Image: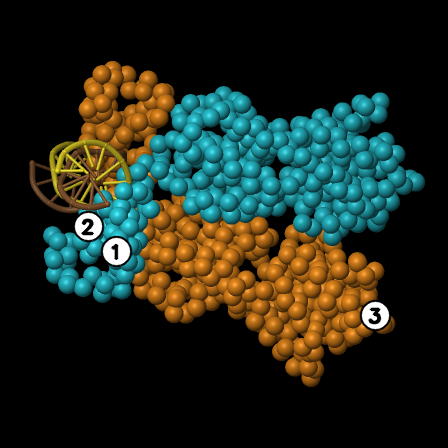
Chain colours: A cyan, B orange, C yellow, D brown
Amino acid sequence: MADLGEASLAGRPVAQAAGAGSPVRIGDVARAAEVSTATVSRALRGLPHVASATRQRVLAVAAELDYRPNLPAARLAAGTTNTIAVAVPDPAAWFNATMVGALGREMTAAGYDLLLSGVANLDERQRFIELNGVRSGRSDAVVLIDVALDETAAEAFVAQGGRAVSVGFRTQALSSVTVDNVAVGSDATQILLRHGHRRIGLLSLDSGDSLNFSIPAHRAQGYEQAHAEARLTPDPALRVSTSNSWAEARRAAHVLLDTSERPSAIFAMCDEQAFGVMLAARDLDLCIGEDLSVVGVDDHDQSRLVGLTTVRQHVARQGAVAAELLLHMLGPSVEPPQHVQLDTELIIRDSVGPPGVD
Amino acid sequence: MADLGEASLAGRPVAQAAGAGSPVRIGDVARAAEVSTATVSRALRGLPHVASATRQRVLAVAAELDYRPNLPAARLAAGTTNTIAVAVPDPAAWFNATMVGALGREMTAAGYDLLLSGVANLDERQRFIELNGVRSGRSDAVVLIDVALDETAAEAFVAQGGRAVSVGFRTQALSSVTVDNVAVGSDATQILLRHGHRRIGLLSLDSGDSLNFSIPAHRAQGYEQAHAEARLTPDPALRVSTSNSWAEARRAAHVLLDTSERPSAIFAMCDEQAFGVMLAARDLDLCIGEDLSVVGVDDHDQSRLVGLTTVRQHVARQGAVAAELLLHMLGPSVEPPQHVQLDTELIIRDSVGPPGVD
DNA sequence: TTGAAAGCGCTACCAC
DNA sequence: GTGGTAGCGCTTTCAA
């Protein structure tokens, strides 16, 4: 009643728009433009079957009234959200933040919103998957960054109509963008072996409650493989594991280094960990590249500054590819999942040298 | 018709849930639990006026049917979104990523989603404000991280019923969390002056199309002020400005350093820039802390590794405070905007020493 | 404590 | 090319 009263009393919708609350609805625009709501809807969204003159008029009126479509209403009616839900174990980690930035740029340009969720353990992953399942209407698709699903879960997700692309791990059912992490581990280890190192520590990445199990395992496999090719067997005692924080990595590096039998080199599974190793080396007055060699993975923005030799993965490119896969997947044509594997690149800096005399 | 047909034919709603599309709606739950949709709605959301036995039954049935409420529908009906829109100039920058992480943790715990938008220029800011205005139904509130609004725009936003908290700048109309950037600039400059530096370069932060104007200006003011207190006048030629990327900062540092009259110290407005300065110093074979002193701002994760003296701002704490202000603002009681200013802290490391002989 | 029913604001179908 | 209108699935009075 109040509604009708307002509408019929208001001789000047423009004043209303200037007021608080902006209760301008599609009907108001329709009335002012002397067309139906259907036409307003078409005109505003650039759909066909609207006379050019009509469209102009509707656009003008909508602008004058400062009309803003109500999103939930549009979404409910259309059954689509124009939103992508992104899961990352830790939004502040460099790789993730950079990835989200790249993804956001692309998806925003394509008219999508980015819903960001920190997913650090199995419960949160479960919740994320449930919340973003098909008909929750929360998102049109999901991007899993280092938040792995096993084959069964992935299949169940798509079987229920879910759309997802995974970054950092590969599953048959989901489109994915990955790098060859065995090669990453192998390349990193080889450069060390080639310099003559024989005791190479391995600083492995925690699987964060086993959410991204495959990456550490694959890189470790590359480490083993490089050793095998050199007819060596790595000492299992030289293997420790931490999160990707430099502080933890530093502590772990001390475990490796505070012994008489310390390694002459360490392969850290990400640059942030490598930074921690460098910090530990400093604690012990070990000179990086002389007393201790270090290799990381990522090519973090800061790696160059500290002269870290590392295996670069092009994060921005991975983000762009992920966006492309998403857009493809959201398009009309239904196609099988695509798997893109991008190249990595060994970047040689100063943190690797021959083993020091002990 | 198809709808009714399905419902009446299906003797086993559970099978339906297991199938694709999960078309289980609130009505299905109501029917199976032999209550009305109103009761289901109340029971599921933990509202009062539901008999405990009834609630149990509804919960059980909903679980068995694997019911997921449709968000747009709920939002449309309730007029609330449980979503916070966050604007940052660059999602990949350390400060922003860390901030978003902290904010996300808190808000997720409180049941909110985080919508992340990269807002790098005036157009995008305009779009962001419009899109997240009151009755767009996109978000319940907005967090502006270093994406400044002038007083007029901020007032207009709240006048239309918008809710926002700002981080990094302060405006009367919006709740805010800030640090004292004049003090930041002054502290950083003072430590340099105290070591005897007289030619101190200033590496200023671009205002990214004037979105976060106040921070660089305030820090510069602190720089001036510290000089004034020491009865000195800084050389305007020692002032350059870049984005927060180390690559650009490095180039800019070269402009400062590749002259015969180069400064003996540089105050960089953020640590990422300071890293760039350190890189430039390395290019020129200048030893940091001896030939060239550097001070940054932030206490970036990597600052410790490279021994950078810096003015720390507690990012996680700022995020937590911002979340608190948000939650307060989304609560029932309407209160005037609150302004929280957090302390900063000078962290002394190795990048500052006495001026080298030239 | 519970249910009936009227919307929330928009889209999309179908008829014109 | 345009308009009428039946939903989209949920919440929320109001009455029982």
Same chain letter for marks 1 and 2:
yes
Badge 1 vs badge 2, beta-carbon distance below 8 Å: yes
Report how far apart the C-alphas of labels 1 and 2 lie in the structure: 10 Å
Q: Residue at x 70, y 28 (%)?
A: A182
- Residue at x-position 55% and y-position 31%: A176
Point out the frontmost of discs 3 and 1.
1
Left or right of B169: which side holds A197? right
Determine which residue is flagged by label 2: A35
Quick check: B332 above or below B29? below
Q: Is residue A251 visible?
A: no
Image coords of residue B341 (percent x, y): 51, 65
> What amino acid type should be assigned to the residue bearing mark 1?
Arg
Q: Secondary structure at mark 1?
A: helix
B181 sits left or right of B157 in the view: right
In the rendered view, tell whether residue A12 sits above or below residue B112: below
Q: Could you tell me which chain the residue with mark 1 belongs to?
A: A
* Three-letter residue code for mark 3: Gly
Residue at (32% x, 55% y) in the render: B134
Quadrant in the picture for residue B216:
bottom right
Q: Chain of mark 3?
A: B
Q: Horizontal placement of A325 versus A302: left or right? A: left
* The C terminus of chain A: image quadrant: top right
Residue A57: assigned label = 1
**Nearer the observer, A331 or B320:** A331
At which x and y percent is residue B345?
A: 63, 64
> Is C1 left or right of B46, judged from the image as shown?
left
The residue beneath circle 3 is: B356
Decide which of tag 1 and tag 2 comes sooner along the chain.
Answer: 2
Query: Are marks 3 and 1 in one subunit?
Result: no
Q: Quadrant of residue A244?
A: top right
Q: How far separated are the C-alphas under marks 3 and 1?
A: 70 Å
